[in-house]
Image (spheres, rainbow, N blue to C red):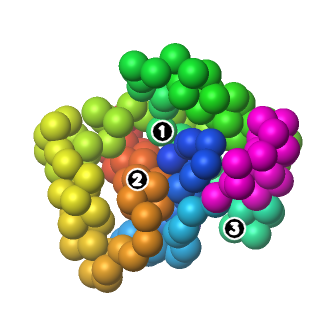
Amino acid sequence: MTRILGIDPGVGRIGFGVIDKDSDFLLVDYGTITTPKVERQERLSRIHSEVSNLLHIHKPDLMALEKLFFNKNLKTAMAVGEAIGVVLLAAYQASVPVAEYTPLQVKEVLAGSGRAKKHEIKGMLELFFNQEIKGHDDAADALAVAYCHLTFESLGL
């Protein structure tokens, strides 16, 4: 069995999703980590702590992380980049390898199109897991990146 922790990085809200794959895919857990609007260092510390806790609880074989893709707002891109840094640090400290996927790769795997909308991705996940995916889109995005990794892995890519 393989366990993947998917992460959709952000600053105010980080999506996470845990999937097991044996002969089939099993949705284990998903949700969002939220941080209050406080000093940057405190937010980053909280993100690190929460991700470290998820790694400790779920003991994944690998973390699948959505790559930061072009962002028109440089300030936002820098902040998300810092958050990605503390997520990567947590994975390193837990000795969990990381695979990164672009939003385009994730959308193509789940919906067959890099132009798929968020509701289409969420709908595909609900079909795959045969259950409603509740909560914020960030959690669904994290499940999608985990599913993407398992798909690539099963294809030997």
Q: Residue at x 64, y 60 (%)?
A: 33
Residue 131: where, in percent of width, then height? 31, 82
Mark number for residue 58?
Answer: 3
> Which amino acid is tagged 3?
His
Q: Are marks 1 and 2 in contact (CB under 8 Å)?
A: yes
Q: Is residue 25 above or below residue 12?
A: below
Within-10-Å neighbours for mark 3: few <14, some 14–19, many 20+: some
Q: The C terminus lies in which quarter of the figure? A: top left
> Which amino acid is tagged 2?
Asp
Q: Earlier in the sequence, mark 3 or mark 1?
A: 3
Q: Nearer the viewer, mark 3 or mark 2?
A: 2
Q: Is residue 141 left or right of residue 3?
A: left
Mark number for residue 66?
Answer: 1
Question: Could you give the CA–CA distance between mark 1 and mark 2, rounded to whole angstroms?
Answer: 8 Å
Mark number for residue 141?
Answer: 2
Residue range corresponding to the magenta coloring: 34-50
Q: Is residue 81 above or below residue 89?
A: above
Question: Could you give the CA–CA distance between mark 3 and mark 1, rounded to whole angstroms?
Answer: 19 Å
